Image (tube, rainbow, N blue to C red):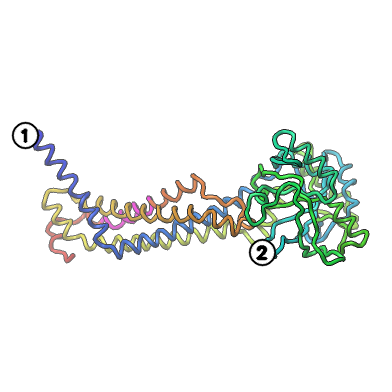
């Protein structure tokens, strides 16, 4: 009987500080509410910026180790002669090469822009066998036979185009197999002033992070032949050559040999790995991952001091309470734990709101910036990082405010003005 009463008394003594901590969280609604809002914004920005950085890195990491890119040594905006492809094919270690030419048109309205590339009709599908999965071909063919059906149709129909699954499934495009898609040119104007027409013969799903799902590939001879007969204006050329090689260990040697072949012109070349070529677009606007990471760190750093300041204010208001708790027999560390608990609870609430906001706006970000912020995703690893960061932030802030309570005596705490 005595033991039971003692146990009940102990449980009541333990639960009292926890009830007190919860009461403090809701007692200072304005201060804690603003603190939660600040943490919400900080965690949202942290998730957004890290998702962008991870998306950029994923595109570079997914580059093929057995593919090179040959471009002009002067600039990416300087085209290469079509006569270069047979000479690239002749180099030792080269498996297959294809020209890629940027088209730069849009569908119906300039806001409906997606990338379009002119590629070799006989080589493109085989070059990208490990990079995307053909999910639908002519006459609705799916499964293992879809790739061969698309390859045949791409070689047969001069206006043939292969599109990413995003152009089929998004409502504003909704392109289907057999559809004739008009693309209004921004570079290669037609003599009649009209749009280029492409016939969809295949739909693919990207298997690598660097390939967007809203993209179109069409036959380069359709573009070049139209220019040669005067139906369109422009230059018959290749923007770059993508080169599949047999052995990734020989990439530097093969790249050097290709560049040596064109050392005397008419256009000197620079051949790099696909990963280095992908990194070029990131470095073109500076070290974007470092910049975004720095911004995210600065935001989190500033919010940390805001939370610490809020907890220090809370701590100064609890001196009388700390004296009363010590007078009732609670050790000094009890008040420290109360502040740590309060800081942790406030930080986790703010972190949860920030994470929910980041997840809730993910589809909106992808819809509006998908082509620019490729592979944007709030993945489980990022969720764990956001919650973990919030927890560390709250515990550290509570600890900074609670440590001084360890040196107060009950009489000193009771004499303070709360």
Labelled disc at residue 111:
2
> What kind of secondary structure does the magenta stretch mostly adopt?
helix
Mark 1 vs mark 2: which is more N-terminal? 1
Where residue 334 appears, as percent x and y from the top left, is 21, 50
Q: Disc 2 on helix, strand or loop?
A: loop
C-alpha distance separating marks 1 and 2: 79 Å
34 relative to 116, above or below? below
Residue 401 drawn in magenta:
yes
Query: Could you tell whether 135 is left or right of 2 in the image?
Result: right
Query: Could you tell whether 390 is left or right of 286 in the image?
Result: left
Q: Quadrant of residue 224?
A: bottom right
Magenta-drawn segment: 391-403
Task: Give neighbour class at mark 2: few <14, some 14-19, many 20+ (Cα, 10 Å).
Answer: few
| Residue at the image point whose x is 70% and y is 35% from the top | 143
Q: Quadrant of residue 398?
A: bottom left
Where residue 327 appears, as percent x and y from the top left, is 11, 53
Q: In this figure, which residue is indicated by the disc labeled 1?
A: 2
From the image, state whether disc 1 or disc 2 is nearer to you.
2
Of residue 233 and residue 144, the one placed in the foreground of this image is 144
């Amino acid at each position: 009987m005595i033991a039971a009463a003692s146990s009940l008394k102990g449980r009541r003594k333990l639960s009292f500080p926890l009830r007190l901590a919860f009461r403090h969280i809701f007692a200072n609604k304005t201060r804690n509410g603003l603190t939660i809002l600040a943490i919400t914004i900080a965690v949202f920005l942290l998730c957004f910026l890290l998702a962008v950085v991870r998306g950029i890195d994923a595109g570079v990491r997914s580059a093929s180790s057995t593919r090179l890119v040959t471009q002009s040594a002067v600039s990416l905006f300087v085209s290469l002669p079509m006569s270069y492809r047979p000479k690239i094919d002749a180099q030792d270690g080269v498996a297959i090469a294809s020209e890629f030419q940027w088209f730069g048109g849009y569908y119906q309205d300039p806001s409906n822009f997606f990338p379009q590339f002119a590629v070799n009709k006989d080589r493109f599908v085989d070059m990208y066998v490990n990079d995307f999965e053909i999910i639908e071909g002519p006459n609705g063919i799916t499964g293992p036979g879809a790739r061969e059906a698309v390859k045949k149709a791409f070689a047969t129909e001069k206006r043939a185009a292969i599109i990413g699954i995003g152009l089929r499934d998004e409502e504003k495009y909704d392109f289907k197999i057999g559809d004739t898609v008009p693309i209004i040119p921004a570079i290669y104007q037609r003599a009649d002033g009209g749009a280029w027409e492409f016939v969809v013969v295949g739909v693919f799903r990207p298997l690598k992070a660097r390939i967007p799902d809203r993209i179109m590939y069409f036959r380069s001879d359709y573009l070049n032949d139209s220019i040669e007969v005067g139906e369109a204006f422009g230059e018959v050329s290749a923007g770059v050559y993508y080169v599949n090689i047999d052995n990734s260990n020989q990439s530097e040697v093969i790249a050097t040999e290709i560049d040596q072949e064109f050392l005397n012109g008419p256009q000197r070349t620079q051949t790099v790995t696909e990963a280095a070529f992908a990194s070029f677009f990131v470095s073109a606007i500076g070290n974007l991952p470092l910049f975004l990471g720095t911004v995210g760190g600065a935001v989190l750093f500033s919010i940390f001091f805001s939370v610490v300041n809020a907890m220090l204010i809370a701590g100064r208001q609890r001196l009388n309470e700390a004296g009363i708790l010590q007078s009732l027999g609670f050790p000094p560390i009890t008040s420290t734990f109360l502040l740590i608990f309060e800081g942790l609870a406030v930080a986790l609430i703010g972190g949860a709101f920030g994470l929910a906001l980041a997840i809730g706006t993910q589809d909106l970000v992808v819809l509006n910036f998908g082509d620019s912020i490729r592979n944007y995703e709030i993945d489980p690893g990022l969720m764990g990082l956001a919650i973990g960061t919030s927890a560390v932030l709250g515990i550290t802030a509570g600890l900074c405010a609670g440590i001084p309570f360890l040196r107060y005596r009950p009489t000193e705490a009771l004499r303070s003005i709360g």
